[in-house]
Image: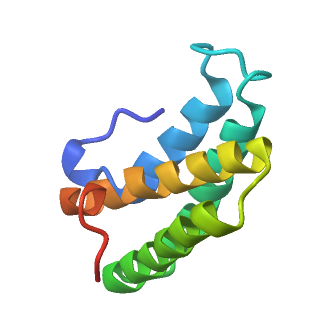
Amino acid sequence: MDNKELTQFTLVDVIERKIHFTKTNTIFDKTDFKDNVEGALLAYNEMLADVKEMKENEFVNKYIKIIKKLAVQFEDEFNDKREIEKMSDYNNAIVSILKCINPIYEYDLQE
């Protein structure tokens, strides 16, 4: 990882570091958390592509809509434990990045 001036540190850098950590950390046994890792990496990679192309409002609106849709799916559609774990970490990864933009997104996901 680069040792950048913090004034040059971007959201792209944050997402790339989260991807790197998720892929390489040894804190937990990845075989036990395979579905969680898969969900987080899916979200981070999607957001990494979008953050390079979108403006802030467009990015935030897209991911708030995804979180709202997931909330409904958790109540009505997700039954499989593996799918729940994957989509939980997918959701958590999105929230972790949205919090970097504005901490309110941890608490209030209303548009």
| Relative image position of residue 104 (x, y in whole percent) | 19, 61
Q: Residue furthest front?
A: 76
- Seen from the viewer's position, the closer of residues 88 and 60 is 88
**Left or right of residue 16, residue 10 in this image:** left
Whether 27 is drawn above or below 12: the answer is: above
Is residue 99 left or right of 42 when viewed as pictured? left
- The residue shown at (33%, 78%) is 56
Across and down, in percent, residue 95 comes to: 40, 56
Between 29 and 8, which is closer to the camera in this rendering? 29
Q: What x and y, as percent, mark residue 18?
A: 50, 40
User: Which residue: 51% across, 66% down?
Assistant: 71
- The colour mode here is rainbow
Picture quadrant where residue 75 is located:
bottom right
The answer to whether one can see residue 71 in this image is yes
Q: Nearer the viewer, residue 84 or 44?
A: 84
Marker count (numbered): 0
- Place of residue 97 in the rendered image (x, y in percent of width and height, measured from the top left): 40, 55
* Quadrant for the C terminus in the image: bottom left
Above or below, comparing residue 6 to residue 11 in the picture = above
Question: Is residue 3 toward the left or the right of residue 17 in the image?
Answer: left
Q: Is residue 110 above or below residue 14?
A: below
Which residue appears at 57% of the width and 67% of the height?
Answer: 70
The answer to whether residue 41 is seen in the rendering is no
